[in-house]
Amino acid sequence: MYSDKVMEHFMNPRNVGEIENADAIGQVGNPRCGDIMKMYLKIENEVIVDVKFKTFGCGSAIATSSMATEMIKGKTIKEALALTNRAVADALDGLPPVKMHCSVLAEQAVKSAIYDYAKKNDLYFEELEGFD
Ligand code: FES
Ligand code: FES
């Protein structure tokens, strides 16, 4: 049911933890399953130089947050904003259909953290239009 990559990221999640003095923190939850994801970013010159996450949730939520952190590390904010849940799921060689919402949580956690950064620094990103 789960791909080897999903299992591997679930067993060995990358970038787990917190960043002290993070430049941005995002948190999202899914009210239906109750899972919560928190993401910390360190940003220098618009580049995400470090990222850590904590996920209280299912295996797919852990695997997708792990993969999402790998995909945005070293990227610009703009590039990170373009990350879709589908891209995260594809990078994991797919997720079972009932688990696709877990990848949505990962995409939203990234956006939530960047939203926090934008608010603190008075920046505007059209990708975050309507995000709250
Ligand atoms: Fe049980 Fe997500 S629904 S951990
Ligand atoms: Fe809800 Fe995975 S079951 S995030």
Image: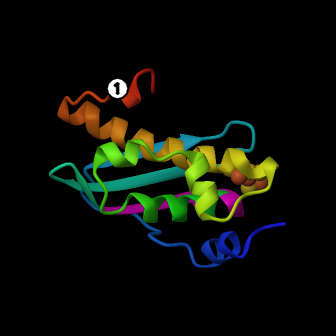
Residue 11 at x, y percent in the picture: 65, 78
Q: Amino acid at mark 1?
A: Glu
Q: Residue furthest top?
A: 130
Q: Which residue is mark 1?
A: 126
Q: Quadrant of residue 131?
A: top left
- Residue 19 at least partly seen: no
Q: In which quadrant will I find the C terminus? A: top left
Q: Position of residue 15 (x, y in %)?
A: 44, 70
Q: Is residue 96 magenta?
A: no
Check disc 1 and report its element: helix, strand or loop.
Answer: helix
In the foreground, 41 or 78 = 78
Percent across and percent down for residue 110 are 44, 47
Q: Position of residue 96 (x, y in %)?
A: 79, 55
Is-magenta flag for residue 58?
yes
Q: Residue at x 63, y 56 (%)?
A: 89
In the figure, 57 relative to 111: above or below?
below
Residue at 70 percent across and 64 percent down: it is 59
Q: Which residues are magenta?
A: 50-60
Q: Main secondary structure of the magenta part?
A: strand
Q: With 121 as the anchor, is 69 left or right in this view?
A: right
Colour theme:
rainbow
In the rendered image, the vertical position of residue 105 relative to residue 121, given as above or below: below
Q: Quadrant of the N terminus?
A: bottom right
Residue at 49 percent of width and 46 percent of height:
109
Mark 1: give few (<14), some (14-19) or many (20+) Cα within 10 Å.
few
123 displayed left or right of 90: left
